[in-house]
Image (tube, rainbow, N blue to C red):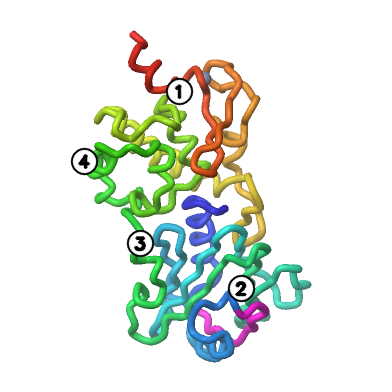
Amino acid sequence: MPELPEVETVRLGLNQVTLHQPIQGGAVLLDRTIAHPLSSEFIDGLIGLSIREWHRYGKYLLAKLDPVGWLGVHLRMTGQLLWMNQAEPLQKHTRVRFFFEHDRELRFVDQRTFGQIWHVIGEQDPKTIITGLQRLGHEPFSAEFSDEYFYAQLQGRKRSIKTALLDQMLVAGVGNIYADEALFLSGIHPETLCADLNPRQAQRLRANVIRVLTDSIAARGTSFSDFRDVSGVNGNYGGIAWVYGREGDRCRTCETPIERVKLAGRSAHFCPNCQPPFSQAVRKP
Ligand SMILES: [Zn+2]
């Protein structure tokens, strides 16, 4: 599933190739990909509009349209936005096509079909149409995601810190890969209860969440799963991952085999030596 660094990588790519050229047409190959308006009205409503700039809110991509409106995309599990020539053969899971001049095309390919696309028409507020935007917490790179805010959100909570990091209302865009990585760098076991973390640990964890996201954006997203950037290229983050996807491999710091546990239905990867359970951590001198 694309997380924040992958969506950011897609955004940067889209801003390089899709701006300031009118949408000339397109096709909807799977009706339910279009969340708004009716799929039959979708392409006609976009013709003649161009994209001024792509923004990202959590894992939502939002294109500001010229002269007015927004185009919203959520990739969900397997969505890909690919920039290619219209003549290139359709991928099996092609769902929506946007045609541009010089026979260029922005193609939405989505195997699992959970991806969604919205056209917010006219001066409407995107949040009223793309209601998921209302449920997003602070951006990890924003000033609002401060040490004080983060610690306050953890205090007194009886859920595990791994589960908390995946909560999009606490912080937007962090998923399984980068939550595991940030916990490793912070020496925190994923099953530690939020309430058991002290302010220093919370501070370190917040810094490491930002660090792993920044590192992965620099690596152009993850090499795990079927993530592709707009030119169809896989990212490079997997080669430098500390724990994610490395069950049984040796810890890069202490050589202990990396372990994996199920936590709230998701896999958590960790080093049992570098990330001791809370009860052992407090007994350590
Ligand atoms: Zn280790």
Q: Is the residue marked by circle 1 packed among few (<14), some (14-19), or many (20+) residues within 10 Å?
A: many
Counting residues from the start of the chain, the first of labels 3 and 4 encountered is 3
Q: Position of residue 47 (x, y in %)?
A: 54, 89
Q: Nearer the viewer, mark 2 or mark 1?
A: 1
User: What is the three-letter code of the residue carrying label 2?
Assistant: Leu
Q: Which residue has dot 4 on it? A: 148
Mark 3 and ligand 1: say if the CB distance to the nearest ligand atom is below 8 Å.
no
Q: Is the residue marked by circle 2 packed among few (<14), some (14-19), or many (20+) residues within 10 Å?
A: many
Q: Is the residue marked by circle 4 packed among few (<14), some (14-19), or many (20+) residues within 10 Å?
A: few
In the rendered structure, find residue 135 and report the number of the disc placed on it.
3
For marks 4 and 2, give the CA distance: 42 Å
Residue at 37% from the left image edge and 39% from the top image edge? 159
Counting residues from the start of the chain, the first of labels 2 and 1 encountered is 2
User: What is the three-letter code of the residue carrying label 4?
Assistant: Glu
Mark 1 and ligand 1: say if the CB distance to the nearest ligand atom is below 8 Å.
yes
Q: Is residue 228 magenta?
A: no
Q: Nearer the viewer, residue 214 or 21?
A: 214
Q: Which residue has dot 2 on it? A: 106
In what element is the residue under mark 4? helix
Residue at 50% from the left image edge and 57% from the top image edge? 7
Q: Are marks 1 and 3 in contact (CB under 8 Å)?
A: no
| Rendered position, 173 above or below 196 | below
Residue 44 appearing in the image: yes
For marks 2 and 1, give the CA distance: 44 Å
Magenta stretch: give its range: 20-31
Q: Position of residue 274 (x, y in %)?
A: 47, 20
Counting residues from the start of the chain, the first of labels 4 and 1 encountered is 4
Q: Which residue has dot 1 on it? A: 275
User: What is the three-letter code of the residue carrying label 1?
Assistant: Gln
Q: Nearer the viewer, residue 284 or 201?
A: 284
